């Protein structure tokens, strides 16, 4: 009886080892890596942030629409460049966003697929310097999207402006 248990254990161990080896070759491939490239057209839709006063905060909405004809199959990157006198302020959404260029740029990676005619948005809170002029407009802000699948680069970036108002 003990001999039978030992034999069965050895067989079970071998099967587990084979199964683990098979899983090790399959699991590292994510859905985005395994999917064939799609034919998707990502477009940046311009949305100017709400006005803010010197030293105040507002939020940049980096709104990306998928015009199709297919859903995205690969990760894509959204980069927000801020105007002079504005710095990014955490927390960002999604959590994959990171500051670059001393807080003047934020880069976000979107890993999930975006369906045809659907959208994705990065939310970047920003703070205006106390020295920005009241009743002025801060220009030079830009939202840009990059995807290896996007064949129409003409709509992949848009400017935005922040209107500076007196705090009430």
Image (cartoon, rainbow, N blue to C red):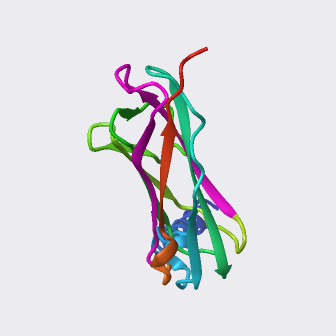
> Is 154 drawn above or below residue 136 in the view shown?
below
Instruction: Out of 76 and 49, give the one closest to the viewer.
Output: 49
Tell me residue 127's x, y (percent).
Answer: 44, 28
Instruction: Out of 70 and 88, give the one closest to the viewer.
Output: 88
**Rendering quarter of residue 65:** bottom right
**71 left or right, relative to 154:** right
Instruction: Specify the farthest residue to the front.
Output: 135
The magenta span reads: 119-148
Tag count in the figure? 0
Residue located 51% across and 26% down the image: 57
The N terminus appears in which quarter of the rendering?
bottom right
Magenta-drawn stretch contains 86: no
Residue located 55% across and 36% down the image: 59
Tell me residue 66's x, y (percent).
Answer: 64, 71
What secondary structure is the stretch in magenta mostly built from? strand
The C terminus appears in which quarter of the rendering?
top right
Tell me residue 156's x, y (percent).
Answer: 48, 69
> Is 14 drawn above or below residue 56 in the view shown?
below
> Is 168 drawn above or below residue 93 in the view shown?
above
């Amino acid at each position: 009886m003990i001999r039978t248990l030992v034999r069965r254990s050895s067989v079970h161990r071998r099967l587990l080892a084979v199964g683990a080896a098979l899983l090790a070759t399959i699991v590292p491939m994510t859905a985005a890596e395994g999917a064939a490239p799609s034919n998707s057209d990502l477009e940046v839709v311009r949305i100017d942030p709400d006005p803010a006063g010197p030293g105040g905060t507002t939020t940049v909405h980096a709104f990306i629409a998928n015009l199709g004809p297919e859903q995205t199959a690969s990760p894509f990157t959204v980069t927000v460049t801020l105007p002079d006198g504005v710095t990014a302020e955490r927390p960002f959404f999604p959590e994959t966003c990171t500051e670059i260029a001393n807080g003047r740029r934020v880069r976000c990676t979107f890993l999930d697929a975006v369906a045809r005619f659907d959208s994705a948005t990065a939310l970047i809170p920003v703070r205006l310097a106390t020295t920005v002029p009241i009743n002025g407009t801060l220009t030079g802000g830009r939202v840009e999207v990059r995807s290896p699948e996007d064949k129409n680069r003409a709509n992949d970036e848009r400017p935005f402006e922040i209107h500076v108002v007196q705090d009430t």
